[in-house]
Amino acid sequence: MFKSGLMIAAMVAGLSSTAMAEGPDKGIERVTSPLGVEEVDQRLRGALEERGLTLVAVVDHTANARSVDLELPATRTFIFGNPKVGTPFMQCQGSVALDLPQKMVLREADGAIYLEWNSPRYLAERHGLEACGLPLEKVAAVLNELAREAAGEGNQ
């Protein structure tokens, strides 16, 4: 029962991310890659490891859809983080645990490969973290670097 509940929660999270990405100015950052899903997947795993970030889980939404006889283009959610960075966010405002650890979605849509993630500035606004003196710009830069490296920008 726990496994099926986790799969449902993961599928809902993936659908929410996808739907929000379509709307303007919803705090979602995006990088497009000319590479295939498998190569971007491996590059993202490598980039996380290089930076000492813990990969908590990868949710394969496509496989989950297939398990109930539905179809979904390649869609994976990478859940990762660093407790030294995330804990101060949660100490500032516990509700940010809804959005941490960090997530990055790798998905195929409209003939393109996308990496998408929540902007730390959006999370700060959503959870009222502005007065906490958190390293939002540093976190934003790391997420941007991860996505660009995984997407193959400048490293092919």
Image (cartoon, rainbow, N blue to C red):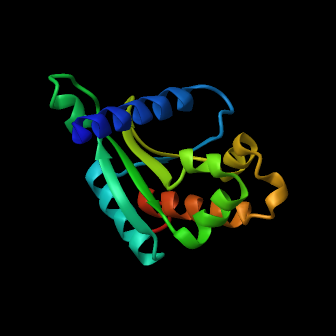
Q: Is residue 63 visible?
A: yes
Q: Nearer the viewer, residue 31 or 96?
A: 96
Point out residue 117 in the picture as x, y percentages from the top left corner.
Answer: 53, 47
Quarter holding the C terminus is: bottom left
The answer to whether residue 79 is left or right of residue 76 is: right
Q: Residue furthest right?
A: 131
Residue with the most extreme top position: 70
Left or right of 126, for residue 150: left
Q: Is residue 123 above or below residue 22?
A: below
The residue that appears at 45% across and 76% down in the rendered structure is: 52
Q: Position of residue 18 (x, y in %)?
A: 46, 31
Image quarter hosting the N terminus? top left
Q: Is residue 151 above or below residue 125?
A: below
Residue appearing at x 76%, y 52% in the figure: 129
* Residue lying farthest to the front in this orientation: 1
Residue 86, image x, y percentages: 59, 63
Q: Residue at x 41, y 68 (%)?
A: 54
Residue situated in front as seen by the camera: 93 or 54? 93
Please state if 121 lies on the left or on the right of 53 as rendered. right
Decide if residue 152 is in sight here: no
User: In the rendered picture of this protein, how many numbered marks are placed on residues?
Assistant: 0
Which residue lies at the image location 32% right of the left edge and 32% below the top edge?
8
Residues 33 and 130: in front is: 130
Q: Vertically, is 93 above or below 26?
A: below
With respect to residue 101, does 23 lie above or below? Answer: above
Residue 133 at x, y = what percent?
Answer: 81, 64
